Amino acid sequence: MPVPDLSSLPAPQIIEEISFEAILSAMMDDATARFAAAGVAYDVGNLETDPVKIVLEAAAYRETLLRARVNAAARANLVAFSTGSDLDHLAAFYDVTRLDGEADEALRRRVILAISGRSPAGPEDWYKTAAMRASPRVKDVAVYRVGTGPDIRIAVLATDNFGEPDAALLAAVDAEVQKNSVRVISDRVTVLSATSATVNVVADIWLLPTTPMTVFEGLEANLRAALASEGGLGFNVTRSWLAAKLHQPGVQKVSLSSPVADVVVDDGAAVKVGTVALTFKGRDR
């Protein structure tokens, strides 16, 4: 079951819109009505120096701050909005603890996984939760069964090293998912790298007449960084995507000769960049 996207939910009704002008207007209307009931004509509300308006402006501002504080307290109790120590307390309710250096968004995702993975018999999210708490370096995980037997594969994608997990990260994940408190007794679990496909890039590059050579020199690093940022499990690396990432500002033309076809992977695999051979072909208008 996919992890729910909380950002797609409508705004909760417990959090109301705040408008200083609307609050002030309601207070001014109330004051005018009270003066009228007392038989007093009040017609100076538009004057900036009117003492009644000055006092009500201060009161409206304080009410705006109070409502904002109530809204903040409401958000702190919702997984989708909670941050910092408030999110830590929500996570603790689901037996999830923030890892060293872990950002709020990563912790929030693990909380949601922990909730959805609590059903019995080791569902996908159960193992995924365990794998992702092994290290903050785990960017994503794919869990799948080989055939109909007890063999479970856990494919790991790293946050660093362009997605390729090193031996230490794989060992950390393996140690976590093999615990008696995690692994279902009938399962045989194997941890492996998710980056099972490699794309080698060969391309000719033309620059515009005034483009500095530093643009060409940085193309490989930009390409690797783009795949690390945008790629992930199930992300297909197409020829058009590669050409677009090489076509940085200042590049006039890109002629891609490798790969000769799109690199397509399944949902449990990721693509990594192998060798990158770029040839500067000159300048063109």
Image: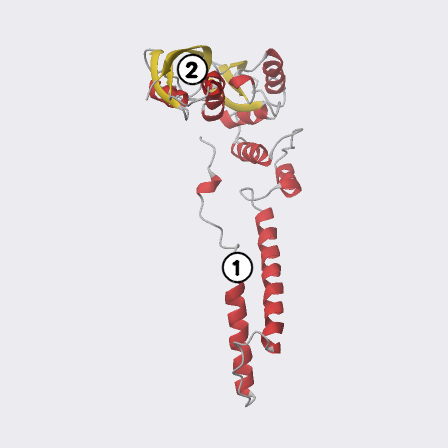
Q: Nearer the viewer, residue 256 or 206?
A: 206
How many numbered tags mark residues here?
2
Q: Residues within 10 Å of mark 1 (few under 14, many from 20)?
A: some
Colour convention: secondary structure
Q: Quadrant of the N terminus?
A: top left
Seen in the image, is 199 located left or right of residue 71? left
Three-letter amino acid code at disc 2?
A: Thr
Mark number, residue 148? 2
**275, above or below 76, in the image:** above
Q: Secondary structure at mark 1?
A: loop
Q: Nearer the viewer, residue 253 or 282?
A: 282
In 3D space, how far apart are the residues under numbered discs 2 and 1 (Cα atoms)? 55 Å
Tag in front: 2 or 1: 1
Residue 147 in the image: state x and y as whole percent.
Answer: 42, 13
Residue 34 rendering spot, x and y as whole percentages? 55, 82
Label 2 sits on a secondary structure element that is loop
125 or 218, which is in the foreground?
A: 218
The residue indicated by pointer 1 is 18
Relative to 55, is 244 above or below?
A: above
In the rendered view, does 267 fall on the left or right side of 42? left
Residue under the image location 58 percent in, 59 percent down: 67
Q: Residue at x 52, y 83 (%)?
A: 43
Quadrant assignment, res 278: top left
Quick one: label 2 or label 1, which is nearer the N terminus?
A: 1
Which residue of the protein is positioned furthest toward the front in this rendering? Answer: 210
* Amino acid tagged 1: Ile
- Residue 188 percent coordinates (x, y): 53, 13
Q: Residues within 10 Å of mark 2 (few under 14, many from 20)?
A: few
